[in-house]
Amino acid sequence: MAALTPEQEQIGKENFSGAVHAMNSGDTKSGGVNRRDALKAIAAGGVGTSAALFGYSELKKDRVRVAFIGTGDEGNILLNEHPEAYMEIVAIADLRPFNRERAFKGDGNDVRKGLIKKLGGDVASKIKTFNSHKELLEHKDELGLEAVVIATPLMTHAPIALDCMEAGLHVLTEKLMARTIPQCKEMIRSARDKNLLLTVGHQRHYSVLYDNANNLVQNGMLGDIKHIRAQWHRNNSFPNSDSWQKKIEKVDQDITDAELDPFGFDNVNQLINWRLYEKTGGGLMAELGSHQMDAASIFLGKVHPIAVSGFGGKNFYGIENVGPKDKWKDNREIDDQIFVIFEFPGPHYEQNNRDKCIVTYSSINTNKFEPYGEIVYGTRGTLFMKTEKEAMLWKEDGRGSTGGGPDQRLWVISGTEGGAGGPVMEAYETTSGPKVATGGTDWATNVSRGYREEMEHFCYAIRNQGPDYWPNDQPVDPKAGGLRCNGVVAMADAIMALTANLAMELQTRIEFNPDWFDPNSDAAPELEHGVTA
């Protein structure tokens, strides 16, 4: 997307917030939720302010006793965001001494405060520390442990989750759900067979910003969506600028092979820099692209894709003579840039198989001119989701409409446009002054990215959705208040990410097999295309 001026971005933000307010100005309900009242609560702040949107309330029973397994970069964000009113942290576990200390002391910033600063020294001192999840599970009964949050390297998600479910614990694991689709299916079946909750941390499912944006999309505000462009570009082309390439801290250098072997790590470097290796991680598509394909899927009504193709390459790191003294040479295995094209079914695909919505995704390591996010192109409007923190909306200028584009404000009216039903955006000159609802941006001034909400709902579900967490052998439907990113939903995101990796590796267009998305089927993209990892 071409660079927007600050004025155009401000217009887009006000357009979005005004449209949200207009859609929710009456007693508008979505899924039984009064969205107007929910937004007022969010604007007011406080505990559980997003509960009305996401189908839960403040916990009326004892807090859920939880252990965090993995306390690195993402684990510390989750520790920082954990909801104290819903969750009592009783233990942490991590192979790395550096991470175990970091969990308590933090990084000296508001993103990763550490447990001492968040909870106070007295409370933090009562949290037990273990070197591994296996050691943790040996003490689960004396801890009164009920659930775990897993934020470990990707290849360990499945084995750790399976061990924890075998021990009778509910599981929230970070994304990507697992390194392979057969592992995803094994996790789902284990949760079902043991009647346990399994959810995955694709936090956009609990983002107030995305939820309200999706409400506009599903109510037809943007018209027909034919293209979504998503990207996450970074510039790591300067020496020592890659946050994924970490040094081995002195306290971690003595981790033994005996400690690493049960998890399959070849050495300490592979443990610490797991994102850079095929065996331990899933590359840019798994770590970054899965978030944005999840967002695209949400906007398209969670339909499954038809096909994917793309290009990936190690085109910068490790190339001879790429810079002075080859400072950028390293032994990473993953691609440093990827470009993929997904084909999704359009609303009339069953009648016309050429009716498709094309979703493109790119991630590069050598230029970050544009911010990461998703741009949704509809026949009646354009939506820009910027860095998970801002949303902008503009009306499309076209036949039968007046005005549009990034320089014009809009308001929402009832009626039809071009014969289409539903709410309609109308544009007017910016010099006329704003026509958004009074206080139109108040609810979006302190937007949560969804980490806290996903953990709140996880704990709420543990206390309130039982004793049968799998009625009719299915997870409780998200539309009925069930986990919004349960194992079945999260497996679809993993299938998209890992199949995109396969398409890039095999340099071919791959069509998605519906059986891949069925947890009761053993079919999987890796098996069908002769790749086991």
Image (cartoon, rainbow, N blue to C red):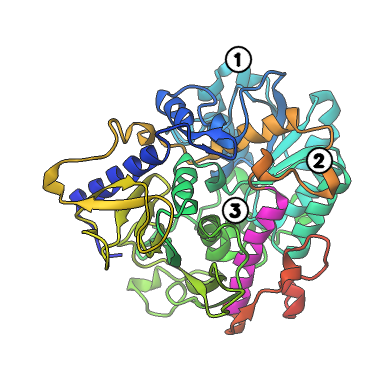
Which stretch did the figure color magenta? 486-503
Q: Residues within 10 Å of mark 3 (few under 14, many from 20)?
A: many
Residue at point 66% right, 54% down?
490
Residue at point 63% right, 76% down?
502
Q: Secondary structure at mark 1?
A: helix
The residue pinned by badge 1 equals: 122
Q: Secondary structure at mark 3?
A: helix
- Left or right of residue 47, residue 435 in this image: left
Nearer-the-camera pick, 51 or 496: 51
Nearer-the-camera pick, 226 or 134: 226
**Amino acid at circle 1:** Asp
Specify whether residue 95 is in view: no
Q: Nearer the viewer, mark 2 or mark 3?
A: 2
Q: CA distance from mark 1 to mark 2?
A: 32 Å
Nearer-the-camera pick, 443 or 28: 28
Residue 495 part of the magenta-drawn span? yes
Q: Secondary structure at mark 2?
A: loop
Nearer-the-camera pick, 21 or 28: 28
- Left or right of residue 92, residue 136 in this image: right
**Amino acid at circle 3:** Ile
Of pointers 1 and 2, the one earlier in the residue sequence = 1
The residue pinned by badge 3 equals: 272
Q: Is residue 108 above or below residue 227?
A: above
Q: Nearer the viewer, mark 1 or mark 2?
A: 2
The residue pinned by badge 2 equals: 196
